[in-house]
Image (cartoon, grey):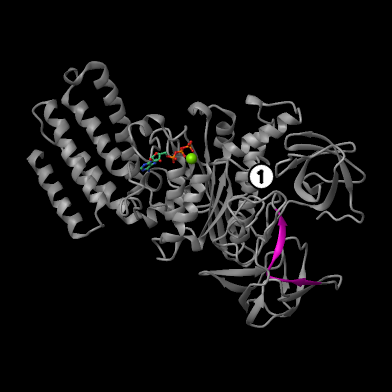
């Protein structure tokens, strides 16, 4: 890590909104943090470019009132996050200010709150032994944080090999108390507490290897799990025009996904949406554990009314906290809404620095920045043999729904699942508006994932899903023909093809995010429903004229939807299933 003997100072030499030029009297490093003294208020800023004796810094707060000549102190370290027990259930902003501790809704300029309560007592249980050889990330002990076994690790900044010289016995300790002393090869001793700091822009690599992910991460969302599944440690993104359901989909993921913990970075979104989560989550139950949802959730909120520079900090802070928990052998789901707002913040800074712009005036290195960020997600094998994962799903808001714009294009190269929200589907209220034809999951091409699905869902699963996909495609084609040639200008079979795809659309793809039962469908139920729907699609049904087709299929769909709204295998569910059989028998060829 960067360490300097003499502190570098500087004076403000130029101000362009949140970009400030500082003339420095000593060495500074890229991404170093400094504080600008505005009549006693200390504004935090980060070095983003150095030219000769001038450091270009982006200020995380409003620079109103700042003047040329104001003094700047450099800290010698990069933007760091505080890691330790007590992060779960917190609401932070991008600089890890605890939003619950603030007076009112927003922090005053230059005001700080403690990220972690250093005095809080935790019931510590040692996991290592005196004499053990340890490395960064090694588990020294654990404390219970909500229901998670929070590992107390050798700090990630520690390089090389250490021996445990002393380790606390089981008992209560404050987060800031020493729980271990480790010594390096040169005999130098280091004290370890439950709290450590780590720079957000440096990936935590305290693991043995990062194999390809293979295990399905159930989300309860049928259009994802059934058609284009994501895996533990996988990456995905949700591009969608204004109002197409990005935020609703991400909130559904955060409520239902089978993860140990959820980190949500609300980046540049409307404040009221963020406030909604703050109020809603503490009242919601985790469907899997029956515990309060907020117990497994950490929110990093940089809403649209906070300075743009803090948006960048918020996504990196969220990722670093995710890596911290992954190193404990947990499966983390990281969500960011919207990464476009982050990219726009990068663009603003780049333009102010008058850098040579790339496409649409975004920085030239935007694709690299995005792909490096997505690359920090993943499934890892830790040095002790345990595994952990970060599954990352970001939203992208392409201006005018144009999927060729730079943020969408760059993200498409970085993420392996693509959940394209379609304006047309959103307009016709077909929610979630994920386009079943344009969207994809590249994980379906992994042989490990195919094997996993065959053994954990069913041998026929992949074939069934492929069949559903084909029916959707054929239905779309039939519909186009019907639109061109007219209802009576095509054979009845075209109508049947179209309506079969409508069954899949209404019963499998569409899902009510606001219904208690329909909102989340376990895999077993998804499998059952897909099989049933495919069965109906394969029945040969008799019709005299096309006019009979439409009302008949509407009845079918209606009954199937009632099943979706009923508890699986409940009396009501079985009743609708019997009704369904009766409707099918009306038309079934003998
Ligand atoms: N799965 C769903 N079920 C029911 N309604 C939905 C669903 N998804 C979206 N909607 C409706 O669409 C509206 C807009 O959704 P949302 O706020 O998620 O869009 P967005 O893409 O995040 O928009 P923005 O671009 O403004 O951020 C919601 O308020 C809701 O009424
Ligand atoms: Mg939104």
Instruction: Give, as a single range, the part of the protein colored magenta.
Output: 190-199
Q: Is residue 230 above or below residue 588?
A: below
Circle 1 sits on which residue? 310
Residue under the point 38% across and 41% down: 432
Q: Pick whichever, 237 or 530, lies toward us.
A: 237
Crowdedness of circle 1 by 10 Å Cα count: few (<14), some, many (20+)? many
Q: Position of residue 192 (x, y in %)?
A: 74, 71
Q: Position of residue 131 (x, y in %)?
A: 74, 79
Report the number of discs: 1
Is 77 included in the stretch rendered in magenta?
A: no
Snapshot quadrant of residue 210: bottom right
Question: Residue 385, can we see it?
Answer: yes
Q: Pick whichever, 210 or 17, lies toward us.
A: 17
Residue under the point 47% across and 48% down: 447
Snapshot quadrant of residue 4: bottom right
Q: Pick whichever, 245 or 504, lies toward us.
A: 245
Q: Pick whichever, 361 or 215, lies toward us.
A: 361
Q: Position of residue 77 (x, y in %)?
A: 79, 53
Snapshot quadrant of residue 176: bottom right
Q: Is residue 469 above or below residue 74?
A: above
Is 193 included in the stretch rendered in magenta?
A: yes
């Amino acid at each position: 890590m960067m360490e300097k003997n003499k502190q570098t100072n500087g004076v403000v030499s130029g101000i362009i909104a949140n970009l400030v030029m500082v003339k420095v009297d000593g060495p500074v490093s890229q991404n170093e943090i400094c504080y600008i003294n505005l009549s006693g208020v200390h504004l935090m800023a980060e070095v983003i470019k150095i030219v000769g004796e001038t450091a270009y810094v982006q200020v995380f707060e409003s620079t109103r009132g700042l003047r040329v000549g104001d003094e700047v102190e450099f800290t010698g370290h990069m933007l760091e996050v505080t890691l330790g027990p007590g992060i779960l259930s917190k609401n932070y902003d991008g600089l890890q200010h605890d939003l619950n501790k603030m007076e009112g809704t927003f922090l005053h300029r230059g005001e700080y709150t403690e990220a972690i309560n250093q005095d809080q007592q935790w019931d510590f249980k040692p996991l290592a032994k005196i004499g053990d050889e340890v490395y960064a990330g090694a588990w020294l002990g654990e404390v219970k944080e909500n229901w998670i076994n929070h590992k107390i690790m050798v700090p990630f900044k520690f390089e090389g090999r250490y021996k445990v010289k002393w380790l606390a016995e089981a008992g209560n300790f404050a987060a800031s108390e020493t729980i271990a002393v480790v010594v390096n090869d040169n005999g130098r001793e280091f004290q370890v507490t439950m709290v450590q700091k780590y720079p957000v822009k440096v990936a935590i690599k305290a693991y043995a290897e990062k194999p390809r992910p293979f295990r399905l991460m159930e989300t309860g969302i049928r259009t994802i799990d059934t058609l284009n599944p994501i895996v533990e440690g996988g990456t995905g993104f949700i591009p969608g025009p204004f109002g197409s359901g990005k935020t609703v989909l991400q909130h559904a993921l955060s409520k239902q996904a089978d993860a140990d913990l959820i980190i949500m970075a609300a980046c540049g979104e409307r404040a009221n949406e963020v406030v909604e989560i703050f109020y809603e989550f503490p009242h919601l139950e985790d469907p899997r554990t029956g515990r309060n949802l907020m117990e497994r959730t950490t929110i990093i909120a940089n809403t649209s009314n906070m300075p743009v520079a803090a948006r960048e900090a918020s996504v990196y802070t969220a990722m670093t906290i995710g890596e911290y928990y992954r190193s404990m052998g947990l499966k983390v789901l990281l969500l960011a809404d919207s990464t476009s707002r982050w990219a726009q913040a990068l663009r603003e800074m780049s333009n102010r620095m008058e850098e040579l712009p790339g496409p649409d005036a975004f920085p030239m290195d935007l694709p690299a920045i995005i792909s490096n960020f997505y690359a920090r997600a993943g499934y890892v094998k830790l040095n002790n043999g345990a595994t952990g994962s970060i599954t990352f799903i970001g939203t992208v808001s392409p201006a005018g729904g144009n999927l060729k714009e730079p943020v969408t294009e760059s993200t498409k190269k970085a993420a392996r699942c693509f959940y394209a929200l379609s304006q047309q589907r959103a307009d016709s209220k077909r929610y979630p508006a994920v386009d079943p034809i344009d969207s994809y999951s590249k994980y379906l091409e992994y042989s490990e994932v195919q094997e996993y699905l065959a053994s954990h869902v069913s041998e026929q699963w992949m074939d069934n899903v492929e069949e559903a996909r084909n029916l959707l495609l054929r239905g779309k084609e039939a519909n186009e023909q019907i639109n061109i040639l007219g209802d009576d200008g095509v054979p009845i079979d075209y109508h049947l093809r179209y309506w079969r795809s409508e069954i899949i659309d209404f019963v499998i793809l569409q899902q009510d995010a606001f219904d208690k039962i329909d909102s989340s469908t376990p895999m077993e139920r998804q499998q059952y429903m897909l099989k049933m729907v495919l069965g109906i699609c394969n029945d040969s049904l008799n019709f005299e004229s096309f006019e009979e087709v439409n009302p008949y299929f509407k009845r079918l769909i209606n009954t199937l939807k009632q099943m979706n709204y009923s508890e699986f295998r409940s009396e009501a569910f079985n009743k609708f299933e019997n009704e369904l059989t009766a409707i099918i028998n009306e038309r079934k060829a003998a």
